[in-house]
Amino acid sequence: MLSFPVPPMKATMKPASAPVPDGDDWAFEVKWDGHRTLAHIENGEVRFQTTSGHDATQRWPDVTGLASAIGTDAILDGEMVVLDADGRPSFDLVQKRTDPAQHPAVFQIFDVLQISDNDATGLAYRDRRALLEQLVEPSVHWQVPAFTVGGGSELLAATAEQGLEGVIAKRLDSIYRPGTRSKDWLKLKHRRRVELVVGGFTTGSGNRSESFGSLLVGIDQVASRDPEVERALATPLTAGELRFAGGVGTGFDSKTLDALTARLNELSADGSPFDGPLPATVRRSATRWVEPKLRVVVDIAEFTNAGHVRHASFVEACTS
């Protein structure tokens, strides 16, 4: 018998150079951009669990009706998502959600670990999904998302067109191994490349004490011509405006750090080139400013609702 908390099974990131799994022994699901959550239903009540094992029930009051809808003890695995105005999952909205009425949650249930006293983790994925579809009646606050057998490349392309995070590939015969990161489950995530302007940097520490910690980047009118960047803007840029877009702290090798540090020192400036107030975290950090003349290509997961880069990694400095 499983009991609260249960460490969830996790997927391994597919290497960028590896092909998308092919064949009818793989199933493919949309990767939902939200909070991984396990639902423990017992005696007509539900407790929601975070990945780290904490009780998150109070965070999701609009989904607690799941217990009475299921009607039996169970442990379910899924992702709590909040949809934006275009109907796409928004991690930023999940993070900042304070009003369930304004930003209702949807629990995307993709696995079942236990039903009543029956442990389902030793069953194959295909069999667990069949049980799940019998167990869960869809509602506005929960559903069992579809999956496909084969056709992973096509689903991956479709999620890119729809602005979704990516796809999870799962072997049809894979059992559920709590607390493991398995190659039986693979993450296929989309990344986006954008060109941004460097306006400053944070001072580095440790082995980067002689270079920098993160580049502070912004969006100008040239960068805003990129449709991906344009969608991140809450309001259009004014002439000459440089709008703060967050920090980039990864993707640098030692040669790149040296070259960028030399260039940043050449562009040193007395004050911030960004228009408008900066986030408190930036104001509190040890920051140096530069003239906004260095443009960089950055690999990101997405822009947040605040227009800041998420999971950003440096690719290259622009030559012109």
Image (cartoon, rainbow, N blue to C red):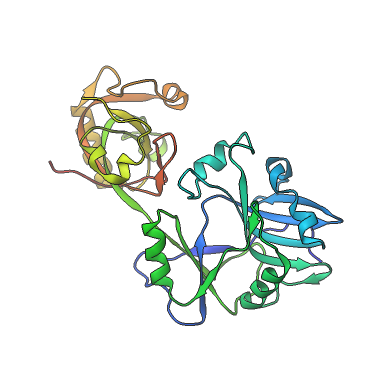
**Farthest left residue?**
320
Q: How many marks?
A: 0
Residue 52 image position (x, y, % from top left): 65, 50
- The quadrant of the image that shows the C terminus is top left
| Residue drawn at (32%, 24%) of the image | 288
**Farthest top residue?**
270
**Farthest bottom residue?**
24
Can residue 4 be seen here?
Answer: no
| Residue drawn at (72%, 42%) of the image | 61
Q: Nearest the camera: 63 or 31?
A: 63
Picture quadrant of residue 257: top left
Q: Nearest the camera: 278 or 142?
A: 142
- The quadrant of the image that shows the N terminus is bottom right
Residue 124 image position (x, y, % from top left): 64, 78
| Residue drawn at (76%, 67%) of the image | 114
Q: In the image, is 85 to the left or to the right of 60?
A: left
Picture quadrant of residue 226: top left
Residue 98 against residue 44 in the figure, above or below: above
Residue 111 against residue 139 in the figure, above or below: below
Residue 224 image position (x, y, % from top left): 26, 38
Residue 152 image position (x, y, % from top left): 43, 72
Residue 306 against residue 124 in the figure, above or below: above
Residue 219 against residue 158 in the figure, above or below: above
Can residue 187 be seen here?
Answer: yes
Q: In the image, is 125 to the left or to the right of 281?
A: right
Q: In the image, is 88 to the left or to the right of 240?
A: right
Q: In the image, is 281 to the left or to the right of 245?
A: right
